[in-house]
Amino acid sequence: MKPHIPLQPHVDFKAWADSFQALRFSPTATLHVDYHVERLTGISKHKKGLYPAALVPRQATNEDPDGLDYGFDAPGLADLKETHPNIIAAVVLKAAMAIVAVSRTGHSHALYNNFEAGRTRYPFVPASVEALSPEAFEAADVGGPVMEGVCNLIAVPREVTGIALLERMQVEQLELTRHAHAPLRRVIDALNADGSGDGDMIMETQSTQFLTWVPGMLGQYERLTNVQVAIRCVAGLVVVAGLGGVDAITYMISMRWDVANFSREKTQVYLADLQEAILWLTNKEYWGVPVGVLVEQLSQKA
């Protein structure tokens, strides 16, 4: 019998939220906003990269079950972790999503949004203030939604190799994580300021395809049973994913879709292509092969 140990409360979310609210227009916050504005300027020129398209107004899935849960092993992750330990499994998924998208659209870029967790530090706190009490501004245990939405505009040059694409996207991911707290509304307003509609394009991307990475999602727990994942958002495709399995090589993916423009059958085909892309990217035999080869293979099936 284990002795009774009182559970320690999480860090109050209000403190984090007050920091975000009070400092969202600070010079530090502006630096984060500027990063996103610089990389997303001109995004409205890539509307062709949106997948899946909405021919009629989108509608949240109302089927029962309301989604599609799927898992598969990617044995090549072990080799990838050994030879390229900087590349994380989530980036492999993001690259695979980009490849599948361009294989369907034929465009040079893929677009989708995702959540950045932002659980490193409190948002926008000046370094001089943090230095007074570094532990006080650590945000890993904050009891609340500290994430922010970000828009991914991913170039997929057909001539680059799979490993080069992964390396480039890993560098981009580190920057997205570093600038995770950038207030999305400020980014949208800044991009819309010139009348281009670039900011509105972020919201259109949000309703088209969305990814969130949840470590341990659909995994096995000692004292918990995952009964159901419920998501009822109006978006073309929603990908909720994580990594599990004894060897941490099992992708767990839960999908939702827009029933007015997509279907369970099309989602199953998309998942099959996503699995093929992940297995291709993690197979060391293909690391030196141009991604255009995979794009062509997938486009012939679509």
Image (tube, rainbow, N blue to C red):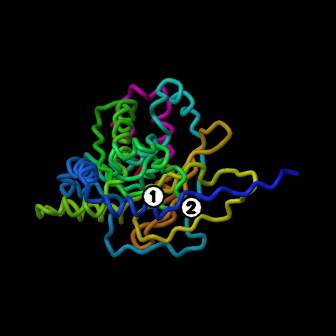
Q: Nearer the viewer, residue 282 or 85?
A: 85
Q: Quadrant of residue 15?
A: bottom left
The residue stretch that appears in magenta = 273-295
Circle 2 packing at 10 Å, graded few (<14), some (14-19), many (20+), is some
190 displayed left or right of 135 = left
Identified by mark 2, the residue type is: Leu
Residue 45: where, in percent of width, then height?
Answer: 18, 55
Q: Earlier in the sequence, mark 2 or mark 1?
A: 2
Residue 97: where, in percent of width, then height?
Answer: 41, 48
Q: Is residue 16 above or below residue 300?
A: below
**SS type, badge 2:** strand
Q: Is residue 6 visible?
A: yes
Residue drawn at 53 percent across, 52 percent down: 214
* Residue 68: image tag: 2
Question: Which residue position holds label 1?
Answer: 146
Q: Quadrant of residue 7?
A: bottom right
Q: Quadrant of residue 178?
A: top left
Q: Is residue 51 above or below residue 167?
A: below
* Residue 165: image tag: none
Q: Is residue 273 visible?
A: no
Q: Is residue 84 above or below residue 265?
A: above
Majority secondary structure of magenta residues: helix
